[in-house]
Amino acid sequence: METYPFGRELIFLLVLKVGVAASLAALLARSATLRRVLFTELRDSDEKVRLMLFLTPPLAVSVWLRLAGYPFADLTLEGSFLLGLLGGRVVGPVGGAIVSLPGFFNHEWLVTPLASAAGLTGGLIRQLMPNKELIWNFGPFTFLNIPRWLLRLLREPRAAWEMVPLAGVVLLEVGRVALGDAPFIAKRWLFHMDPSGAGAFVVVVLATMMAAAVPLKIWNNTRTEMKLVEHQRLLLKARMDALSSQINPHFLFNTLNTVSSLIRYDPDMARVVVIKLSSILRRLLRKQENFVPLRDELAFVDDYLDIEVIRFGRDKLHIQKEIDEATLDAFVPTMLLQPIVENCLKHGLAARLDGGHIRIAATLEGGRLRLRVEDNGVGIPKDQLPEVYVKGIGMSNVHERLKVLYGDDFALSISSREGQGTQIHIEIPELVPAA
C-alpha cells in the first residue's frame, strides 16, 4: 500500500476522486428511471432493486479502475454508504458487497466486510432519521456548519440531523485508515489512501466526505427540478379546474332558465329539453379532461344548441356548419366552443326580434387548426371590443385557458361591426392522436 504525504500529489488525487464522484452522479442523473426512484422518498422493494442495479455496476467499475492503476477512482466506501443512506439496511450491505467484488477477487479480504459495514451504517442512519427528507440536507460543505451547530447546541439542545451522515462517513473513513494501518493486517487485504501525517489524514477524510456528499447534492438538485415540474403540473390542473368551475355553472344557469320558461306553457317541449339537459350533464359529470376530439366538442355544442333552438324558435335561429372532415379527430381544449356560442346567442342574437344565424367553421392549414364562430347579431361597439377579453366571462375564460395550455402559441381575435354581427377566430396547434 502506497503512503501519501501531504502535498500536491495527494491533493491532486483527492480532487480527482471528488470529480469522479460528481461526474458519475451527473451521468446517472440523466436516467429518467433513476430520477423517478430518487424522487420517491418512500421506496418499495422494486424501486430499491432498481436503485441498487443503477449504482452498483458503475461503482464496481470504479474499483476495477483503481486496480488498473487509478487509485483516485475507487468509491467503494462512499458508494456503499450512499446505497444504505438512500436504499436502507438491506440495499446498503448487499450493494456494498457487490461493489467490493473486484477487490475481493484481488485478494483484498477485508474490503467486502468494510463495504457491507458502510452500507449498513448508511441504512441505520436512514432508519434513525425522523424525516427521510432530512437526508438531502447533507452537503459537501456541511462541515462548515459545525461551529454554528455547537453554539446553537449550547443555547438550545436540538438535534442537527444533517450532521449524522457527516459523522457516519467520517467515522467510516477513520476506521478504514485505522484498520488498514493495524499491525496484524496485511497491507494488501484492504485498500485505502494511506496518509502520512496529520495534514494528509485530514485531507483524506475531507475528500471522502465530499465524495459521498457531492452525488447527494447533485441528485437533490435533480429532485428539486422534478418537484418544480410537478408543482407546475398541479398548478396547471388547479387553474384549469377553477376555470371549468366558472364555465359550467354559468352555462347551467342559462339552460335551467330555458327549462323554467318552457315548463309553464309547453310541458312536452320542456320534457325534451330536460332530456337534452340530462345528456349535457352526463357529459359534464365525466372525468374532467383538458383536451377532447373536435367531434366530441361539436356534439356537446349540438346538445346545447338543440335547447337554444327550442327557446328561440326554429324559424328564428339557424345553425350552419362548415367543418373540414380532417379536423374532426384534432384535439381541442374541452368546453372551447360552447362559451363562444353562448356569447353569440346572449349578446348578439338575443336582442334581435327576428333572430339570426350562427355559423361554425373549422379548417386545417399548415399544421394549425383554425376555428371560426360568427353570428349576424347586433355586434359590439368598437370602443367596447378590447373589454371583451377582460370583462366577458365566457371569452375571458376561453382566453385564459388557451394561455395556460398553449402559452403564446395560439391566436384569439374578435372582429365585430355594429348591426352586422361578430366573428371570433381561434388558431391553435394541430394535436392529433398517436397512430
Image: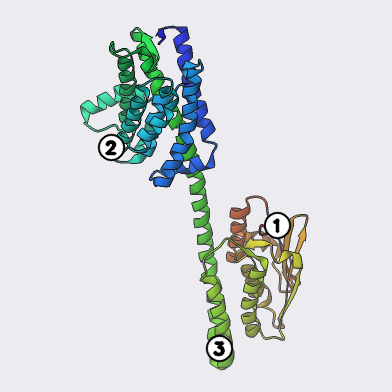
The residue carrying mark 3 is: 271
Q: Please name the residue shown 55% across and 67% down the image.
A: 247
Point out the tag, 3 or 1, that comes first from the N-terminus.
3
The amino acid pointed to by label 3 is: Arg
Q: Give the spatial CA distance, label 3 vs label 1.
A: 39 Å
Q: Give the spatial CA distance, label 2 vs label 1.
A: 53 Å
The residue carrying mark 2 is: 128
The residue carrying mark 1 is: 430
Closest to the observer, 20 or 147: 20
Q: Please name the residue shown 38% across and 18% down the image.
A: 206
- Image: 258 above or below 200: below
Q: Do we see residue 185 in this rendering?
A: yes
Residue 92 position by quadrant: top left
Point out the tag, 2 or 3, that comes first from the N-terminus.
2
- Image: 389 above or below 62: below
Element type at marker 3? helix
The amino acid pointed to by label 2 is: Leu
Element type at marker 1? loop
Residue 300 position by quadrant: bottom right
Q: Nearer the viewer, mark 2 or mark 1?
A: 2
Q: Is residue 23 left or right of residue 205?
A: right
Q: Nearer the viewer, mark 3 or mark 1?
A: 1
Q: Is residue 139 left or right of residue 418?
A: left
- Image: 98 above or below 362: above
